[in-house]
Amino acid sequence: MRLLRPRLWLTLPVLALVACTLDTTGTGVASTETGSQAGNSQGTSGAGGAAAGASGSPQAGSGGATAGAGGAGQAGATAAGQGGATGKPCAADADCDDGSPCTQDVCVGSVCENKSYLNPSCSDGNACNGKEVCAVDGACQKGAPVSVDDGDACTDDVCDPATGIVQHKPRSVGDGDPCTVDACNPKTGEITHVSMVDDGNLCTKDSCDSNGNVVHAPINPSDADPCTKDSCDPTSGVKHETIVGCSGCTKDEDCDDGNPCHLHKCDTTTGACLPGNLAAGASCADTTVCNGQEACDGAGVCVAGTALVVDDKDKCTVDVCDPVTGVAHSPVNLDDGNDCTVDACDPATGVTHVPAVLDDGDVCTVDACATPGGVTHTAIPDCAGCTGAGDCPDRPCNLKSCVMKVCSYTPRPDGFSCTDNDQCNGDERCAAGACAPGTPLPTDDNDACTVDSCAPGIGVQHDPVSYDDKDPCTTDSCDAVTGPKHVPIPGCKPCTTPGDCDDANPCTIDGCAPGGACTHSPKPVGTPCANANKCDGEEQCTAAGDCAAGTPVSCAPAACNGGTIVTEACEPASGSCKKISTVCGSSLACQIMSGATCATTCQDNTTTSCASPSDQYCMSNKCLPKIKNGDSCGADIQCESGRCGNSTKKCY
């Protein structure tokens, strides 16, 4: 790690403007001793300054400034003039205004008195940063800010500067998808959208339509092989277990292929399972009532019924469907955890959280709200309303009065001097009854490597930025125009041990070189690097450090066995070939045409393209069992005997 730029400190002169007078006599009148001491301490170099300090009058201080040498007398005169607050002549209270919101300026006997207030309000108009009061030294002291954060990351917290009322507005979490459950974590603020489709059952095919209806259709586990036991486990999925010593069926149970709409009949003479389907309308119910009553369609397919209606169109309920008990509607949770809101729900629009009303209309209470606790109205000690203007807190840009025990204020003329004791926002002046900031002090030094700021009582500051990214694989620096730079060191990957450098390649040796850079050296040619698939051959490492595949396992090509396509597939775990049988639909024959395929049609009243020509005949593109003697027929080809009576229309 290299740091290319030294720290930079810039300082600017700090300007402090304080104009406060203290009542040290107990009469509300500022003592003249302050002006005398200031005049004596500053006017040493001029006779006029000494005289000004002794008399405490502005005129004497001014004369001292004229007579003094080197400017010392002038400083004494200024200090003396400000300190002698009770000696200023006046005709009205307005002549005595010293510009401080924390003094009461009155004209008594044609002489000004500037009395310091003890803890009256000197509000800055922002109810969110606390209640300002005057300190004993005449300065406006800020109060405790209003607590805004409700500790819930799923709400946006704001405070109204005019009223101090805090609101916590819930964030929007919906993604517009009816097939997800949308939620927000109140601790982290993370918004999640959890799918309602997957039921965790590998024996169902899960889907969701545009109306939010979830369907879990059962999977048919049958492989049409009478010598395998077909099943499906909700956790592991479809299974085909070979029946030891099986050469065909001996009873109807041997023909159960897992499809509830198949016939499941065994011809014990031939050991073959008879094809056929249950009649249309036969029940094939699954494990859930939510997708309706299932029934066979007559073609061997279990068709889902009409799904139950889950949504009750009421936004004040949570709608779910239980596989056993069916549809249920439970009330939504209204409580947002905020004691400062009134929680309610409208079936059409949903949940609302309206801020609680704080104001109780009593001027002698402090109205507030907090979580926990709710709305409170704290009595102001000894408060009974005002009896005169003196009972009303000062406002720097307003004249005060008391009307019917209620404090009233009228704006001072625009341009009247006021102060908020913050030199960073310039020279403040009254505007429309409020103390408006002046022109802020410039803070930008046009250096991207410093953080520029201005703080009350301190002034403008330019603190160096921190540009060290703590990454040993970058060179860190700072440019005054573009700011911090982090240039990657070529070929460097941070590490402390070889374990930090694993590249998941079985054909490389991972190491951590001195200085923290990872290395990856090829293993010897021919080193085994087998994967979990034994069907792609034995893998070995190459000189380039790659894992090359071996010779793949070759399985027999597809073949036909009557109406069944027999194929072989390699099992990755063992590397051996396993036969897979696929029965052609409608009992049609298997054909060898560029591989093994099932016939798609057969010729009516013939045995052409049927899987068992001796036992079947074709009708409407389906191969049907031949008819026994005595049963109705329409052509000779339909009968087991090969004869259909012309007059009786029965096989004989």
Image (cartoon, rainbow, N blue to C red):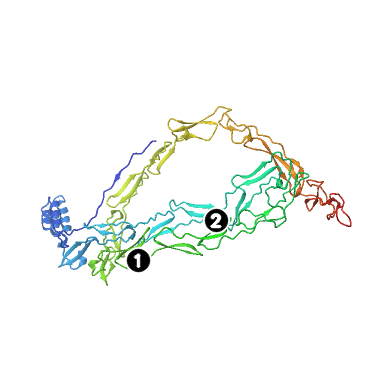
Q: Which circle marks residue 177 in the picture? A: 2
Q: Nearer the viewer, residue 154 or 277?
A: 277
Image location of residue 9, percent across then percent down: 30, 43
Residue 62: mark in rendering: none
Tag 1, which secondary structure?
A: loop
**Residue 101, how many percent across, how many down?**
25, 61
Q: Which label sits on residue 359?
A: 1
Quarter occupied by residue 368: bottom left
Q: Pinpoint residue 436: horizontal percent, then vertical percent.
A: 31, 60
Give the residue type at disc 1.
Answer: Asp
Residue 572 vertical placement versus 234 (above, below): above
The residue positioned 59% from the left and 46% from the top of the image is 235
Residue 115 horizontal/vertical position (percent): 19, 62
| Marks 2 and 1, how far apart at CA | 42 Å
Near-viewer residue (541 or 356)? 356
Q: Amino acid at mark 2?
A: Asp
Q: Label 1: few (<14), some or many (≥20) within 10 Å?
A: some
Q: Which residue corresponds to the image point at 43% horizontal and 38% vertical from the top-left?
A: 487
- Residue 40 located left or right of residue 504: left
Which element type, helix, strand or loop, lies under badge 2? loop
Looking at this rendering, what residue extends furthest in the bottom direction? Answer: 404
Answer with mark 2 or mark 1, whichever residue precedes in sequence.
2
The answer to the question of whether label 2 and label 1 lie on touching residues, with beta carbons closer than 8 A, is no
| Number of on-image labels | 2
